[in-house]
């Protein structure tokens, strides 16, 4: 798995030494700077200052020195490589979706050490689902720690298919998660694992995982996921997720589609995009058209096998989604749109429908540099985004560097 970029706030030598420690750790963890000279170039700090900060991190057992050698740039001896000490802890990324929980565990340096999927029923409620999820994580940690040598969790993230209050770490009136409204997800997991916990919407983690694996110039990036519901996440040019004033940004699935069919959405409104174009909605309509129980319809498999009606409905869904995305292009002017979901992974029909409408409907200024691409594995992308979120929290000034003595605070 490639290393993903981590955000690295500008180092502020005098005013906030812990922020400088955090920035240096993030640059090392992302692989963007693996020696002292590279850290000096990346931060703009003078080399002697970087050397002093790095030595403090080494003395505190945060960084390891001399992990292999880099090829020298020009003449001179090879630079000594730096790495975060694996003993700092594991990074756990959890993604909860309809019917399953996905878990990825990596070392503090982004090396995957374990991954697994557990079947669950969201209707069992948050207490049961989170308890089973935590038990599953602990099972995976047994295998992971044989590789990472860590004895603690440095950071954990969990993605839910729901609107999230990211500050409190709680779902807010989630249409797809009855019984989860206001449940203290972050508090429960922090008490269980005794580590910082990030709770976010699943589409935000998908957007983050996709954006941080691409060159910086491909942002702003808008990720839209089509599954049991429809959601989106937006990563801005600075690499950060845009959540809006209250964390409600990206709820594109509840945009009203004009001239709809009067279908009532789980949110209580009528003709929301996800009531017409989500995989669940398409399976329901297919079942009605063919006089079969919608619960027995595997719509993704039908599309994969080239069923004529399923393919037609997928193309129609792509057209509806494209109409909404054309409006998003006018409002947000993204450089990249990535479309993910199970149907996208088995067929190009939905993506071609989206592309056709967006390029036709949006103004040329918004589309002349716009790229519209498919994500073939949304679950893996979501877990990678969750890893980034958890790792950045772990390496924040309030994370693993919080107990360091700031040697330059008085200067």
Image: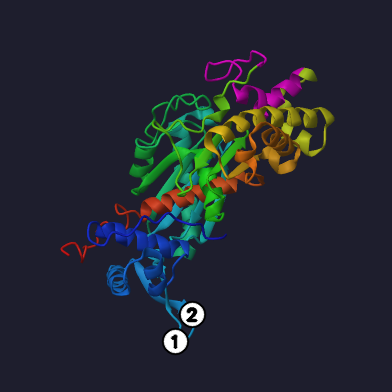
Give residue 225's position: percent from left, percent from top.
Answer: 60, 37
Answer whether labels 2 and 1 touch (C-beta < 8 Å): yes
**Residue 109 is a magenta residue:** no
Label 2 neighbourhood size at 10 Å, few (<14), some (14-19), many (20+)? few
Q: In the rendered view, does 349 fall on the left or right side of 166?
A: right
Q: Which residues are magenta?
A: 259-288
**Residue 287 is a magenta residue:** yes
Location of the N terminus (image quadrant): bottom right
- Residue 287 vs residue 38, the one in the foreground: 38
Q: Which residue is mark 1?
A: 76
Using the image, determine if residue 255 lies above or below residue 35.
Answer: above
Q: Which residue is mark 2?
A: 73
- Residue 17 vs residue 82, the one in the foreground: 17
- Residue 237 vs residue 69, the one in the foreground: 237
Give residue 368's position: percent from left, percent from top.
Answer: 64, 44
Q: In the rendered view, does 51 fall on the left or right side of 103?
A: left
Instruction: Determine whether the residue tagged by mark 1 lies in a helix, strand or loop.
Output: loop
Using the image, determine if residue 357 lies above or below residue 191.
Answer: above
Q: In the rendered view, does 311 fall on the left or right side of 14?
A: right
Location of the C terminus (image quadrant): bottom left
Q: Which mark is residue 7?
A: none
Decide if residue 11 is in sight here.
yes
């Amino acid at each position: 798995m490639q290393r993903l970029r981590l955000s690295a706030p500008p180092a502020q030598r005098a005013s906030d030494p812990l922020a400088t420690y955090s920035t240096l750790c993030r640059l090392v963890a992302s692989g963007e700077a693996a020696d002292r000279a590279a850290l000096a170039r990346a931060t703009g700090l003078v080399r002697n200052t970087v050397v002093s900060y790095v030595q403090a991190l080494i003395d505190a057992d945060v960084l390891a020195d001399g992990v292999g050698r880099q090829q020298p740039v020009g003449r001179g001896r090879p630079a000594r490589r730096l790495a975060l000490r694996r003993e700092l802890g594991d990074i756990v990324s959890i993604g909860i979706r309809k019917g399953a929980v996905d878990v990825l565990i990596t070392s503090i340096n982004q090396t995957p050490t374990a991954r697994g999927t557990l079947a669950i029923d969201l209707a069992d409620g948050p207490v049961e689902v989170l308890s089973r999820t935590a038990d599953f994580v602990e099972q995976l940690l047994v295998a992971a720690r044989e590789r990472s040598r860590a004895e603690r969790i440095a950071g954990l993230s969990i993605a839910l298919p729901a609107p999230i209050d990211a500050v409190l770490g709680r779902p807010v009136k989630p249409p797809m998660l009855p019984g989860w409204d206001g449940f203290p997800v972050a508090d429960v997991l922090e008490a269980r694992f005794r580590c910082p916990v990030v709770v976010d919407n699943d589409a935000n983690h998908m957007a983050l995982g996709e954006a941080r694996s691409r060159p910086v110039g491909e942002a702003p990036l808008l990720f839209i996921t089509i599954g049991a519901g429809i959601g989106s996440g937006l990563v801005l040019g600075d690499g950060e997720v845009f959540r809006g004033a209250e964390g409600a940004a990206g709820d594109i699935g509840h945009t009203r589609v004009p001239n709809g069919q009067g279908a009532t959405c789980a949110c209580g409104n009528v003709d929301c995009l996800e009531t017409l174009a989500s995989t669940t909605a398409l399976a329901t309509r297919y079942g009605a058209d063919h006089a079969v129980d919608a619960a027995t319809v595997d719509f993704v498999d039908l599309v994969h096998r080239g069923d004529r009606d399923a393919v037609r409905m997928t193309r129609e869904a792509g057209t509806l989604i494209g109409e909404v995305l054309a409006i998003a292009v006018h409002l947000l002017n993204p450089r990249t749109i990535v479309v993910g979901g199970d149907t996208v992974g088995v067929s190009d029909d939905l993506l071609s429908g989206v592309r056709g409408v967006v390029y036709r409907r949006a103004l040329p200024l918004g589309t002349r540099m716009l790229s519209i691409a498919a994500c073939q594995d949304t679950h893996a992308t979501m877990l990678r985004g969750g890893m980034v979120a958890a790792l950045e929290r772990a390496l924040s000034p309030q994370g693993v560097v919080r107990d360091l003595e700031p040697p330059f605070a008085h200067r």
